[in-house]
Image (cartoon, rainbow, N blue to C red):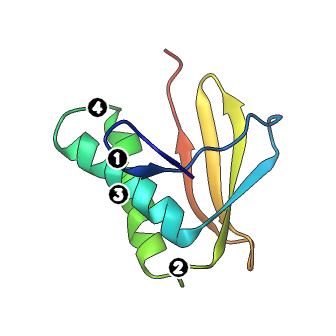
Amino acid sequence: METGGDGMQQTCFPKTKLGVAMATTAKVLLFDMNVRLKMQEEGITSPPQSIKDVTRQLVSELKALVPEEVIDVVVVSEAPLHARYIRAKTGQVLAEIHGQNT
C-alpha cells in the first residue's frame, strides 16, 4: 500500500495480464471503494449511473465481510473496463463493473 498526495492509503496493484486476479482484503478494498463512492456522490468524478450503483453495491457487500477476507479483482478487459470482485474463499461474485469505452 502507498500513501497518496492527500496522505490517504491507496491500494496499488501491479499491472497484470487480463483475466488474472489481483488479491486484496475486504478491508483495503472497502477503504478504496468508499473513497470512490464519496467522490462520485460529491460530483468529483461522474461515471455513469450504472457504475455508481455497482460501487454502492460493492461497498455494501464488503461491509458485511470479515476485514481480512481475501477478495480477487479480475480485470476482464480494460477498454471498456470490465472487472469482477470475487470472494476468494467462496467464488461469490460481489460485484461486476462494466464501464463504457471512452
Q: Quadrant of residue 43?
A: top left
The numbered mark, 3 or 1, whose residue comes first in the sequence reads: 1
Which tag is nearer the camera, tag 1 or tag 4?
Answer: 1
Marks 1 and 4, the one that precedes in the sequence: 1
Q: Residue at x 62, y 38 (%)?
A: 82
* Amino acid on which the number 2 mark rests in the picture: Pro
Q: Which residue is mark 4?
A: 45
Q: What kind of residue is marked 4?
A: Thr
Please report whichever mark, 2 or 3, sits nearer to the chain's N-terminal start: 3
**Secondary structure beneath label 3:** helix
Q: Which residue is mark 1?
A: 7
Q: Determine the image quadrant of residue 46.
A: top left
Q: Nearer the viewer, mark 1 or mark 2?
A: 1
Q: Is residue 45 at all visible to an observer of this figure?
A: yes
- Marks 3 and 4: in contact by CB < 8 Å? no
Gap in Å between the C-alphas at discs 4 and 3? 13 Å
- Label located before the other in sequence (4 or 3): 3
Determine whether 100 is above or below 14 in the image: above
Q: Dot 3 corresponds to which residue?
A: 34
Label 3 and label 1: CA atoms lie apart by 16 Å
Q: Is residue 30 above or below residue 13?
A: below
Q: Position of residue 100 (x, y in %)?
A: 50, 25
Classed neighbour count for the residue bearing mark 1: other residues with Cα under 10 Å, few (<14), some (14–19), many (≥20): few
Q: Which residue is mark 2?
A: 67
Q: Is residue 3 left or right of residue 87?
A: left
**Mark 4–mark 2 distance (CA, rounded to whole Å):** 27 Å
Taking the view exactly as shown, the residue that stands out farthest to the top is 102
Q: Position of residue 65 (x, y in %)?
A: 52, 81
